[in-house]
Amino acid sequence: MNVKGFRRSAVYLTVLISILLMLSAAVAEDKEITIGYQLVYNPWKVAIANGEFEKATGYKINWRKFDSGSKVITAMASGDVHIALAGSSPIAAGVSRGIDMQLFWITEDIASAEALVVRDGAGITAPQDLKGKKLGVPFVSTTHFHTLFALEQFGIQPGELTILNMQPNQIAAAWIRGDIDAAFVWDPALGRIKQTGKVLITSGLLSSWGKATFDGMVVSTEFAEGDPEFMAKFVKVIAAADAAYRDNPNAWTPDSEPVKAIVKMVGGKAEDVPGVLALYSFPTPEQQASCQWLGCGADGGAARALKFTAEFLKAEKKIPSLQPDFSKFVTSAYVEAAMKMK
């Protein structure tokens, strides 16, 4: 080859290398995702702290912290977040407004982590004793939803007691002053009021009566359908984190590495974590895929819960209309794919 031909080949090679580098950069850029999480004690925070999701998926993950479910769902609507943790009420509101997302994992069944507590000395020993009393609850929350459902089961009309719109910190303060007789709330306010009160009913029992509340993971439908392999790997990691807790909850002591990792992500006190985790139920992949939660279409537990919650939100004038079919916003496909992975 003459000098001129060599130079031409060198130029071609340089151009080819540049193209390959650009393509490689484009692929790397595609393998990036933003995930929104909230300050809730749960096992999957350990996997975040240890970088397990990145190791399993090969993605660069931008973890964004949010202080409410409504805010993270708003971020999903704008496209700023691809996957997010939110409660069943914000999820129901989001899909009712037409956000194209799917619920693919039940992070936790709220179970005993939310409860209706009555104050010592308030003279309430049975549900009927709530009549004429003052009850504090954050409006348009999962506990507000369950408050009205509980009253319905007890045969009590909402107007037969005074229901006050109070945030958890306001409930705790009002409780100490004796301004309210009962409250339906979550930790840490729940733990404070239980010190001088007793639990009348839990969200877990109300869920078993047909109207469940939960925290769940939702994903942009476009992203999920574009990379189902990522979704299966992601689910496998979160399932393993839950299993580590379910298999040996007593090992999750304040000085254990998992609890330290959770506090690193969420903050708070390590001694509070074991007690809070014990209040939740973390469904297995088999339970997730079953009719109890993500399976069985419109008859599945999650789809029915979203429908009932949306009906509640519409009655409270927080959403304008209902979706004709909530099952299209729920999928068990990625759980089922994860269970087949080695």
Image (cartoon, rainbow, N blue to C red):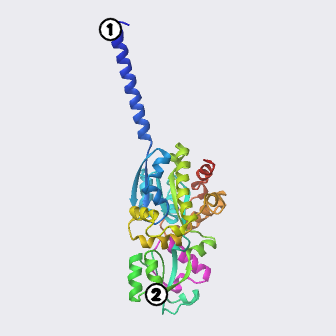
Q: Amino acid at mark 2?
A: Thr
Q: Residues within 10 Å of mark 1 (few under 14, many from 20)?
A: few
Say which residue appears at 38% left-offset and 79% top-offset.
170
Indicate yes or no whether the magenta region holds residue 87. Answer: no
Q: Residue at x 63, y 57 (%)?
A: 289
- Name the amino acid type tagged 1: Val
Q: Which residues are magenta?
A: 139-164
Whether residue 324 appears in this view of the structure is no
Q: Residue furthest top?
A: 2
Q: Secondary structure at mark 2?
A: loop
- Does the image show residue 20? yes
Could you say which is closer to the camera, residue 177 or residue 31?
31
| Residue 174 percent across, percent down from the top left | 39, 84
Residue assigned mark 2: 196
Toward the viewer: 213 or 325? 213
Where does the N terminus fall, quadrant-wise?
Answer: top left
Dot 1 corresponds to which residue? 3
Instruction: Kindly report the secondary structure that dominates the magenta region of the rendered protein.
Output: helix
Residue 86, numbered label: none
Q: Position of residue 270 (x, y in %)?
A: 41, 70
